[in-house]
Image (cartoon, coloured by chain):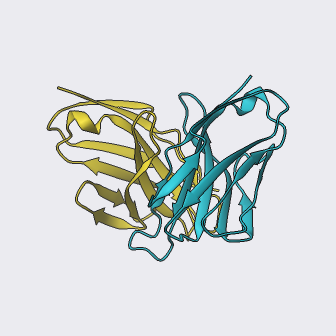
């Protein structure tokens, strides 16, 4: 099972781009990479998913190199409301999908 | 109400008692999950289910029992609660045929305290 490693915390300022990297050296061929955001006292919320290369949606981009051993979530122009914990999740629906420990992002004014 | 709901939202119980946490979703998603989140930590998968009558163990299944007789319900039972099971429990569902096929929808959580 792929284990993920993320930085424990990151600080940023409003308007900056934030990149959070997740390491998953043992990723399996069928595994997808998914990122979630969690605010205090709430359940996680889906941000983006990807298998390889680059994926972009209205809130974020996900960069996955060819070897897929890591992935980077990119949040453009963060605001105070983006302060949250961000989780990287690697797995296949038919197997045990495991959350990492999460990265606590603090956006400062 | 549409969506995914959990009940109760808060529960205090004593060591050794049996407790059942309920999870209900209205979307008919085939996959459902139970996670626990200890204070200040990430989520750990307890059990998951790919369809009614199909369940599998996750990372931390010991001390828990699940069943899924209907697609929309996925109850989690602590057979004999211990203090180490004090946690926030999240239920989630997933539609593998959806546009974002790995998007899990999470419930609001149940905060369980075992005294």
> Which chain is yellow in the rendering?
A
Residue A61 visible? The answer is yes
Image quadrant for the N terminus of chain B? bottom left
Q: Say if B71 sits above or below B89 in the image.
A: below
Classify residue B111 as left or right of residue A33. Answer: right
Which residue reaches farthest front? B1
Classify residue A77 as left or right of residue A42. Answer: left
Q: Residue B3 at what x, y percent from top left?
A: 46, 59
Residue A65 visible? The answer is no
Q: Say if B91 sits above or below B17 in the image.
A: below
Classify residue A15 as left or right of residue B55. Answer: left
> Which chain is cyan in the rendering?
B
Give the quadrant of residue B16: top right
Which residue reaches farthest top? B115
Image quadrant for the C terminus of chain B? top right
Q: Residue B97 at what x, y percent from top left?
A: 47, 77
Which residue is at a point 42% across and 52% down the rendered structure image? Answer: A35
Q: Nearer the viewer, residue B50 or A21?
A: B50
Which residue reaches farthest bottom? B97
Q: Residue A85 at what x, y percent from top left?
A: 41, 37
Number of marks in the image? 0
Which residue is at a point 40% across and 62% down the rendered structure image? Answer: A49
Which residue is at a point 49% across and 52% down the rendered structure image? Answer: B106
Q: Residue B79 at what x, y percent from top left?
A: 83, 43
Give the quadrant of residue A62: bottom left
Q: Say if B73 sits above or below B86 in the image.
A: below
Which residue is at a point 22% across and 33% down the rendered structure image? Answer: A80
Q: Nearer the viewer, residue B53 or A24?
A: B53
Q: Nearer the viewer, residue B42 or B90?
A: B90
């Amino acid at each position: 099972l792929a284990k993920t490693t993320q930085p424990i915390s990151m600080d940023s300022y409003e308007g900056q781009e934030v990149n959070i990297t997740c390491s998953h050296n043992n990723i399996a061929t069928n595994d997808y990479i998914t990122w979630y955001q969690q605010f205090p006292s709430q359940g996680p919320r889906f941000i983006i998913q990807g298998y390889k290369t680059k994926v972009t949606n209205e809130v974020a981009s996900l960069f996955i190199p060819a070897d897929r051993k890591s992935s980077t979530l990119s949040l453009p122009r963060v605001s105070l409301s983006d302060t949250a914990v961000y989780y990287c999740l690697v797995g296949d629906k038919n197997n045990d999908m495991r959350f990492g420990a999460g990265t606590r992002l603090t956006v400062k004014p | 109400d549409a969506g995914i709901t959990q009940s109760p939202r808060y529960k205090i119980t004593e060591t050794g008692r049996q407790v059942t946490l309920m999870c209900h979703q209205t979307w008919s998603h085939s996959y459902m999950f139970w996670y626990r989140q200890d204070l200040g930590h990430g989520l750990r998968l307890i059990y998951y289910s790919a369809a009614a009558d199909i369940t599998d163990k996750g990372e931390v299944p010991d001390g828990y029992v699940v069943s899924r007789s209907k697609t929309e319900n996925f109850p989690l039972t602590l057979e004999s609660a211990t203090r180490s099971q004090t946690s926030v429990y999240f239920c989630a569902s997933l539609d593998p045929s959806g546009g974002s096929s790995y998007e899990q929808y999470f419930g609001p959580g149940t905060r369980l305290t075992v005294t």
